[in-house]
Image: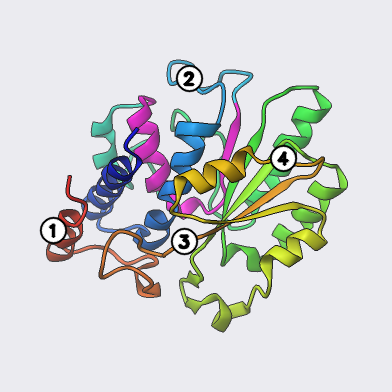
Amino acid sequence: MDYEKKAKEIRAEILKMLYAANSGHPGGSLSCVEMLMALYYDTMKGLDPKDPKKADRDRFVLSKGHACPTLYAILADLGYFPKSDLANLRKIHSHLQGHPDCKKTPGVDVNTGSLGQGASISIGLALGAKVQKQTWNTYAVLGDGECQEGLVWEAAMSAAHYKLDNLTWMLDYNHLQIDGSNEEVMSLGDINAKFKAFGWEVYDVDGHDIKAIDEALQAPHNGKPKFICCHTIKGKGVSFMENQFGWHGNPINKEQFEKAFAEQEV
């Protein structure tokens, strides 16, 4: 696969969705593209668009649920539903709402939206697999602003306590959130050191380098839950959106869309 070309295609679909909806979250959707590509195209096992609820499939939790346009674009690309459905993002009666809904969208495993809750749900999935002696794995993508939630740290503590070596959390570490930078709002400090102290196996990668992400995903758990800190750029791939917290949740007008779409070269 030509990863660079595919990433541009996914970003183009995200932009089309958000422009058509005249609402949504461009910045954080664009920053996690390569992270979800590494999971869905290279890592997760047992995925079958013809059988989305296949019992032995790996599970995925988009804990930062507002970035669902990225997930929808990839699911459509894999054939879970027609790409034409993407034009209905956030439309009434559409199965593609502003946050993932597992009862409506084929391929979505967990409803998310309230930040921090997806992290805890992933613990339940991983623990459930252990109790039932199943071999599938659970993966979750969290936002950095989300990691200011106490719920995340209670979940992190329980994951280590139960030695959930079938669980991987990936942090979309773009350093920005709706009100500004993480440092200004609530500093995360040394996030890797914190997860190590909580008993996780920790890896640190460039979140836009799919090969590096793949290597971290394949690296050993060593009997622990795995945390992968993915350093990313909010608004990645769109020159006027990159590293601008104002694009966390702003709509895109026609001029902005045309410029952003042209930058994808698709």
Instruction: Return the residue at label 4.
Output: 220
Residue at 29% x, 27% y is 82
Q: What residue did someone put label 3 on?
A: 232
Residue 8 in the figure: left or right of residue 160: left
User: Three-letter amino acid code at disc 1?
Assistant: Glu
Q: Secondary structure at mark 2?
A: loop
Q: CA distance from mark 2 to mark 4?
A: 26 Å
The quarter of the rendered structure image containing the N terminus is: top left
Secondary element at image label 3: loop
Mark 3: give few (<14), some (14-19) or many (20+) Cα within 10 Å.
many
Identified by mark 3, the residue type is Thr
The prevailing secondary structure element of the residues shown in magenta is: helix
Say which residue label 2 marks. Answer: 48
Query: Residue 99: in sight, yes or no?
Result: no
The location of residue 251, given as percent across then percent down, is 27, 63
Mark 2 and mark 4 residues within 8 Å of each other at the beta carbon = no
The residue pinned by badge 1 equals: 258
Please name the amino acid that badge 4 sits on: Pro
Q: Is residue 29 left or right of residue 230?
A: left
Whether tag 3 and tag 1 are in contact, CB under 8 A, the answer is no
In the rendered view, would you say 150 is above or below 40?
A: below
> Label 1, label 2: how many angstroms apart (C-alpha)?
35 Å
Magenta span: 58-80
**In this rendering, would 176 be left or right of 163?**
left
Say which of marks 2 and 4 sits in front.
4
